[in-house]
Amino acid sequence: MIKQILIIISVVAFLIRVVNYQYPPLLWDEASIGYNAYSILQTGHDEYGTFLPIIFKSFGDYKPGLYIYLTIPFVAIFGLTELSVRLPSMIIGSLIPLFLYLLITTLKPKSTKLALTAAILVAFNPWNIHFSKGAWETNILLFQLIFGSYIFLKNKYFASAIVFGLSLFTYQASKLLVPFMIINLIIYKKIFPIKFFILIGLFFIPVVYGMLFGADANRLKVMNLMSYTRPVTELTEITNESNQFDYNLFYSQPIFFTRNFLQRYFNFFSARFLLFEGDWNTMRHSAPYIGVILYPTFFFFIFGLILAIKQYHLHKYFLIWLIFAAVPAALSLDIIQAVRGLNLSVPIIYFSALGLSAIASKKNIILILTLYIASFAYYTDLYYNHLTQIKPEQSLVGYKQAIQYLELNGQNRQKIMTNFYGQAYIYYLFYTKYPPLKYQLQANLITNGVDIGVVEKIDDILFKTPDINQIKNSSQKTIAIAAYDEIIRQGFQIKDFVKISPIFYAYQN
Amino acid sequence: MPTKISLTIIFIIAITLRFWNIDNLPSLNPDEAALGYNAYSLIMTGKDEHGISWPIHFKSFGDYKPGGYVYMAMPFIKIFGLTPFAVRLPNLIFSILTIYVLYKLILLITNNSKLSTLTAFTLAVNPWHVHFSRGAWESNTALFFMVLGLYLFYKKSNWFTLPLIVALYTYHSARLIIPTLFLILCIKHYKQLLNKNTFFSILVSGAICLPLLFSFLNNGGTTRLAGVGLSADRGPLSRSEELLNQHLNFNYYDRIIHNKRVLYAISWGQKYLSHFDLNFLFINGDDVPRSKSPEMGQFYLIELPLIIFGIYFLLTNSKYKPLLFLITSLLITSPLASSLTFQAPSALRALPLVIPLTILTSLGIYQILNIKILKYILIIFYIYSIAYFISAYFIHSPQKYFFAWNRGFSDIVPIIEKEKNNYQNIYVTNKYDQPYILYLFFSKYDPTSIQKQIKLTPPDQFGSSTVAKIDNITFSIPETIPPNSLVIQASDFQFTGQSFKIKNL
């Protein structure tokens, strides 16, 4: 019976994640993941011609490679499409409910009801759905944390060490999360398996090496709040108001850092983030005007926490997880960061399930279900009908159509594609399925000290802001895609352009 | 340490934090000045500044202030004259008494003198409570009467309603919080109420409240609600339109889910829960400069773990059961009024929240105090935190938030008075909210004379008005200044070290 329920949950979870898979439009990183997988598949080298890299240079942000390798079989089957890039995350995301169930029942035998509730909640949780629908590495990491813990508790230390070790090549936040997670497991199990530590230690060697002698590739970028200091104007203001002693005692760097860190950390537990606005710093990380968990979940979460506090030793594992989950995310500069904080969704779901399974009874189950269905329907509308419309420039609406337009209408013309929204070249490579061998020869990423570079040219296609005036008066046949803002800034009327999307417009002379 | 000595020390600390330099810090704000000047006007003429005899709500800036505080301030102004100290004295006294009554209340419920003393301590040094004790904040005065009402209620006195009525006459928000809170308490303890005397006292109290109700309805209490209420926030309305327009052809279903009522309900939920935001409580505090000290929360950061311990012990220890119900009811009801206004979280309107949270803090302290090391660490942390607060409140606030604190206005009034007859026109900046009342207050302007000429400007978007002109003093600076004028401009204190620039033309 339970098996069937779990299968149904997984299938439903997969359907929720796979339906309408082209929405929202591909982001830069997704296009890059897809093209690099395609390049590896065809040539064994990435876009820069490096042979089977572990870390991919990509835009100069040096992506950990695991997700790209996961994508290769899907590119082999379905070709270079949105679906093949996103399928790994969709499939793994729909396995999370199942393995969360297994983890909870392993931690607490005889807690079938709680574990099933948690599986259902996580299958329908907006935060998890959002990052399962796209090629988000953080979603794979979350799965690895659950899966690795589960097999560790099943005494399969060798496999567990490999899962945790591989997660270091999945997503940056793992460098802090995995040690936390292992400590948590040891506290829970009170054992110290030597071979597990030897193996995981081997995986950590390159990470530690990178931290100490680091090229860009391995630097512990998760800690960039550490180097954030108070602006000089603010500093002089404070010392002018009082004196240096007062500044040292109450406003100096360690206190400034602590306040900043806690402010970010507390934001993850605010109703504003969880219920009402989601990631308000980067709109594309959550549906607009709504949080990352469903409304009823919040109340069950509070109730579950109260229950858990009463008997904290029974829920120690998830209580500790709840406390450290947001730490790596709070160490980034962003005031709130739903991507890096994704693993917080699991302890939240656990305590919500605890509250819900304690409250739910035959009498009120209809009411609870109604509230959940209404809340989920409301979320679905905001996600599908409003996410890309409220801030189209955040969701990069129209890159695909722009490239297709360029290819269709650009025969025998000079082609110019705007780089206003960044990394236009990767969309060109992706949507034209540009031969990787040919690109590897001309790949030229221009970096100016900052870590994200630009590609200005592929063959005769230029990726830059089109100078409309020059095109207008030029004798050379040209086709250009410009961003809305660029057209306005150059003083042209939008009606003279062909609209491709709310942010991209085409022009030809 | 014996309880008496501890309490004495606590009250010395409380009085020092609240009374130190109270005449200047903070500078008098227009609301306080209005309370004081109207009391002064009543003493001198029996009418308020608008010429209305013994009102229940004072028209003031068109915001119809509840009158309780004005009447409480009258004896002090009669004795000490029209000074900031005299206006603030009632609230200062009540704030000290709040600590004492809370001590008695906890003692009554738990019969634990150590815990009660700790509660007195945490309230005495609480930055939120100290802030609103220093000044004529009706919110804090109403809080005293609420706590007194709670004490009498738990004492099973039949007349617990009397202090509550005073609170209702004193502060708007109390009118929502107190009835809700006591309704919950009365339902829980209904047996205690089932006797003739209580019934009689409630009846009498209801009768005493009737004039308040009529005055509220007659004096535009409803317009006040419209000015600061939930509907004053246009955000949900425009959001509803925005979302509907994003559907190409919206159907009946879309109309329902993007209905403005749905969006207002969600907005209310967000405002209500924002009072429990940890950043509001422990890191940043209120957004309004007049309600906060820079770079600190409403509570000390060190109190967050203590509150969590407090919750744990409250939930697990059965001897705190009566306390559990009181704390929960207070937590739920305190943000009610504030969540219905356009600006939330509001430290001022949700001030009663300070009571349950200080009780929780003291519970946390009480339980970990047995561990010697933690005791000393705690003492060090508290000393540091109080010093932090003193630095933020007494040193940085007056300089950083000089506009919000109306810094320096008292200094220019003598100049105006001296030069008033030497110039044809005097222009004073309107950078401060209602400068006219500060002028009336500090110049001790003759009430009969203002009653004749007072004329309020049309209300702004928040429903508050001001007075543009008194005699030859205009409270705004025109673009072209006629000859023979004295102009008093606002100046950026942080750059110039002065609040005003004085120019004569």
Image (cartoon, helix red, strand yellow):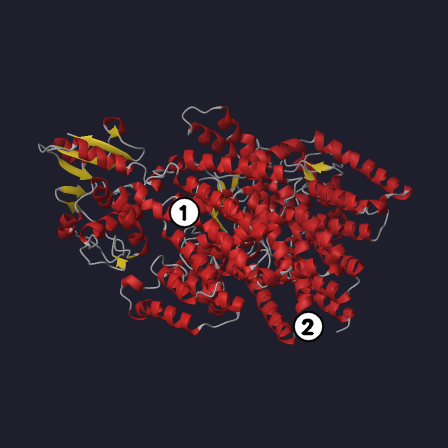
Q: Position of residue A190 (x, y in %)?
A: 53, 70
Q: Provide the residue designation for mark 1.
A: A131
Q: Residue furthest left?
A: A475
The tag on residue B123 is none
At label 2, counting other C-alpha atoms closer than 10 Å, the crowd grade (few under 14, some 14-19, many 20 or more) is: few
Q: Residue at x 79, y 53 (%)?
A: B151
Camera-side residue of A56 and A417: A56
Q: Provide the residue designation for mark 2.
A: B370
Q: Residue at x 68, y 54 (%)?
A: B356
Q: Residue furthest bottom?
A: B372
Question: Tag 1: residue type?
Answer: Phe
Q: Quadrant of the C terminus of chain B?
A: top left
Q: Position of residue B229 (x, y in %)?
A: 60, 36
Kindly indicate whether the residue at mark 2 contacts the one at mark 1 (C-beta within 8 angstroms): no
Secondary structure beneath disc 1?
A: helix
Query: Is A20 on the left or on the right of A407, as rendered?
Result: right
Q: Residue at x 12, y 42 (%)?
A: A460
At label 1, counting other C-alpha atoms closer than 10 Å, the crowd grade (few under 14, some 14-19, many 20 or more) is: many
Using the image, name the chain to which the residue with label 2 belongs.
B
Vertical placement of residue A122 versus B240, above or below: below
Query: Is B227 on the left or on the right of A203, as rendered?
Result: right
